[in-house]
Amino acid sequence: MKILIENIKELVLVEDTQRAYVAGSEMASLSTINNAFLLIDKGKISEYGRMEELFMPTEENKRLKKVDASGKMVFPSFCDSHTHLVYAGSREIEYVDKIKGLSYEEIAKRGGGILNSAKRLHNTSETELIAQALERLEEITWLGTGAVEIKSGYGLTTEDELKMLRVIRKLKELSPLTIKSTFLGAHAVPLEFKGRQGDYVERVINEMIPLVASEELADFIDVFCDKGFFTIEDTERILMAGMKYGLRPKIHANELDYSGGIEVGVKYNALSVDHLEYTGEKQIEVLRGSETMPTVLPGAAFFLGMVHAPVRKMIDAGLPVALASDFNPGSSPSGNMQLILSMGCIQYRMTPEEAIHATTLNSAYAMGVSEEMGSIAIGKKANVFITKPIPSIEFLPYAFGSNKVDTVILNGKIL
């Protein structure tokens, strides 16, 4: 059935000519249509424009499902390009440790952090992991997210990494969201490999990657290239091994120090480099002209009390920027992209227009789906949300404590 959303107060992020992403000063310019309509047919955006331009033949008009959006706005759904939302249980005790002053690295050295999640995941069945993850996906759907990337990395054994990726594959079948899967076996070094990091890297390369590829379980490969985790040399070897099987890189980079992660990401044409708290002029220059999307994770920096990535410097230098949630139990226990949008404005001094681009089109690029979503364009997947009555675009990031989403449409269906 065709869906006609009519009397839209403002239709946001309209593209007559589609772009892969938006960079630099262009991020501050947001194309919208006032008093608009949006026509959806066969799961795709088929037409849009001003209400006075709308013409529907009588017979076709009878077959339409009409939605009145008077006083409301329509946005493309958020694309969350970096999450770890398949996990077993929460880690609020570590949250208290953080309050008491322990650092991320100190908690990890005590067996907390990623290793804690790995232990819990090992003892949790695939069925239970699927059930927990579906609840999280349901929550973020009603907060406006239409596409999400999910990483493994809480397995850290071959068996458990494959278990995580099979869970993600099942979620693709069960959820209306567009889901991309990333193999992150190099998320941390397991305790049994303490002092033998090279041996674990060998296991990732020679055992895990071939099995992941043989079952076609991942779209991308990722490495935590940072201080106290995996070195540049480790990262290069793992990325090259993954690329042989067609897995494009995505990198955890420069969260804890100037790790070289940005440089290695660009060198291997990573789709994105993520975190970026430690980014200077050198790293910005490396990113300039590359096809790698700088992706900032405000939730993690907020939760851990870290320095902020220099987003203003990046944009002013002509770079694109994406924002994602980093939804995970240890450092960003929220997948609320409305909140991430607000943080982009409040903490990183982005304009609302820049932050909207960063959470839609640019984050769609960062997970490889900008050709089919991230903006309002003819032929793109009809993943949109209708807001509650709101006074302006600026209200979306301004009212950071409330859910502004009224109606969710995914794959051309009203949920």
Image: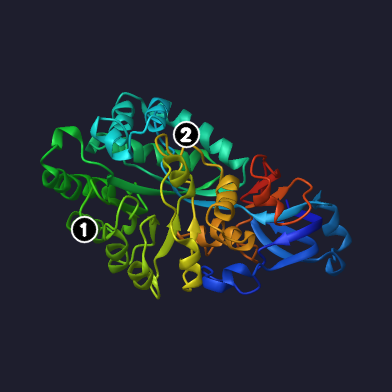
Q: Nearer the viewer, mark 1 or mark 2?
A: 1
Q: CA distance from mark 1 to mark 2?
A: 32 Å
128 lies above or below 234: above
Instruction: Give the mark, 1 or 2, whose residue is nearer the N terminus.
Output: 2
Count the numbered circles shown.
2
Q: Residue type at mark 1: give it.
A: Ile
Residue 294 percent across, percent down from the top left: 42, 62
**In the image, 384: left or right of 324?**
right
Number of residues whose C-alpha sits closer than 10 Å to that of mark 2, classed few (under 14), some (14–19) or many (20 or more):
some
Residue for badge 1: 232
Residue 154 vs 198, above or below: the answer is above
Report x, y in % for residue 70: 84, 52
Q: Answer few, some or many: residues within 10 Å of disc 1's Cα (few below 14, many 20 plus, some between 14 and 19).
A: some
Lateral position of residue 243 relative to residue 180, left or right: left
Kindly identify which numbered label has been placed on residue 133.
Answer: 2
Identify which residue is drawn at 35% across, 25% down: 124
Name the one closer to the observer, 62 or 279: 279
Quick one: SS at disc 2? helix
Residue 135 placed where, x, y %?
Answer: 53, 31
What residue do we see at 49% from left, 59% from top?
322
Type of amino acid at the residue the image marks with label 2 = Ala
Q: Residue at x 32, y 58 (%)?
A: 249
187, 408: nearer the viewer: 187
Q: Residue at x 44, y 44 (%)?
A: 300
- Left or right position of 319 against 146: left
Instruction: Confirm or deny contact between disc 1 and disc 2 (CB under 8 A).
Output: no
SS of the residue under disc 1: helix
Asked whether residue 391 appears in the rendered view, the answer is yes
Give the quadrant of the C terminus: top right
